[in-house]
Amino acid sequence: MGPPGSGKGTQGVLVAQAQAVPHISSGAVLRAGASGEVLAQMAAGELIGDDLIAGLMWTRLRDADAARGFVLDGFPRDVEQAGALDAFLQERGEGLDAVVLLEAPRDDLLARMLARAEVEQRPDDNPTTIARRLDVYESETEPLVALYDRRGLLRRVDGAGDPAQIAARLDAALRSGGQAAAPR
């Protein structure tokens, strides 16, 4: 988890490849299964309702390739979704192994997302929407940090730097069960 532009997608793909499990991005699941109204909400930087995203995620998590595990990217985004994820996993007799929090300065996040917008041409990556998404993240998603920290699942990783540096810190945090900060 982490704010938009923190590298969740890039790092999630790398961890998933290393573990030979699928990388499941809530944004990709939404873009693949959402209607025009939902896509318009996404383009405006608004959060999508818990029922819709949870239903789409449960469908994806039931796919055969996710039977041995998965890396989630952007889900859950709030405490209510975390509770729904817990219930879903409990039904399967599973639980979370770890929750990675990628942290980066807001200016870095804005720059990354604007650069991504130029390459990917995603309609939800424009300056107004990016600022809105970061604000929404701060108010809606950050309570998950405390939840997963209390459960002993949280691994804080400094998301500044190039993807290889971040990947090395993330790997170290997962192996040690702790934090991986950038050298100062």
Image (cartoon, rainbow, N blue to C red):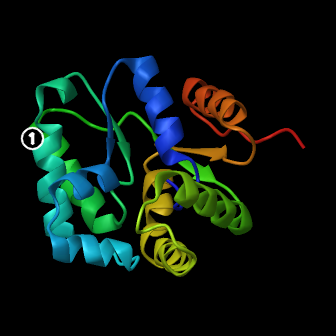
Q: Quadrant of residue 59?
A: top left
Q: Amino acid at mark 1?
A: Glu
- Does residue 111 sit above or below 169 in this rendering? below
Q: Is residue 5 visible?
A: no
- Does residue 10 sit above or below 22 in this rendering? below
Judged from the image, the secondary structure of the residue bearing numbered disc 1 is: helix
Q: Quadrant of residue 65?
A: top left
- Does residue 95 sit above or below 106 in this rendering? above
* Residue 175 pos. (x, y %): 57, 23
Q: Residue at x 50, y 28 (%)?
A: 14
Q: Residue at x 56, y 78 (%)?
A: 131
Q: Which residue is mark 1?
A: 91
| In this picture, residue 155 sits left or right of residue 73 | right
Q: Is residue 15 visible?
A: yes
Q: Residue at x 46, y 68 (%)?
A: 143
* Residue 5 pos. (x, y %): 56, 57
Along the viewing direction, whichever of 113 and 147 lies nearer the viewer? 113
Along the viewing direction, whichever of 181 and 44 lies nearer the viewer? 44
Q: Quadrant of residue 27?
A: bottom left
